Amino acid sequence: MKNKMLLGFIIAALPIVAQAAQDPIPNIIFVPKNAEIVEAEQKRFGGFELEANVSNDTLSNLSDEVKNFYNEQGFSLHREQADHDDVELKFIKEQESIEVDIELEHSGIIEYSVDYETK
């Protein structure tokens, strides 16, 4: 009985431990509402990577939110490629670049990833 209770506690605590192990997300990274963070990691030589799953949104809406956020931060849109299930955006500001990939996955889930780099 004790082993089952301990196992249940460990399983319940895993998401909390996984979330706690992630690096804090810098303010320069846009995180959509309804985002479930999969990975948030400071890069070894500067920059940051974020991967999240987003529900209850559309590619178009999310793309517009991302563009508005980075425009307000002083970034300019350098490249935009889009098709029916994927949007790729690249923003540049002085010595910083941000690449965003928004991809429609199964069951209406959107995979959202950001790669932030400083030069």
Image (tube, rainbow, N blue to C red):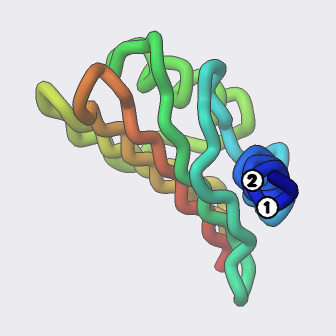
Compared to residue 67, the image places residue 115 above or below, namely below
Q: Which mark is residue 4?
A: 2
Can you name the residue that lies furthest to the bottom here? 45
- Name the residue located 81 percent from the left edge and 52 percent from the top edge: 1
Mark 1: amino acid? Asn
Q: Residue at x 71, y 52 (%)?
A: 11
Residue 41 position, x and y percent, is 69, 67
Which residue shows up at 30% across the image and 20% down it?
Answer: 108
> Helix, strand or loop at disc 2?
helix
Residue type beneath disc 2 = Lys
SS for callout 1? helix
Residue 44, picture quadrant:
bottom right
Q: Is residue 53 above or below residue 115?
A: above
Residue 2, visible in the rendered structure: yes
What residue does disc 1 label?
A: 3
Q: Residue furthest left?
A: 84
Q: Position of residue 31 (x, y in %)?
A: 66, 35
Horizontal side of residue 77 vs 110, given as left or right? right
Q: Is residue 28 left or right of residue 107?
A: right
Q: Is residue 49 above or below residue 13?
A: below
Q: Quadrant of residue 116?
A: bottom right
Label 2 crowd bin: few (<14), some (14–19), many (20+), radius 10 Å: few
Q: Residues within 10 Å of mark 1 (few under 14, many from 20)?
A: few
2 and 1 marks in contact (CB < 8 Å): yes
Res. 15 visible in picture: no
Q: Which mark is drawn over residue 17? A: none
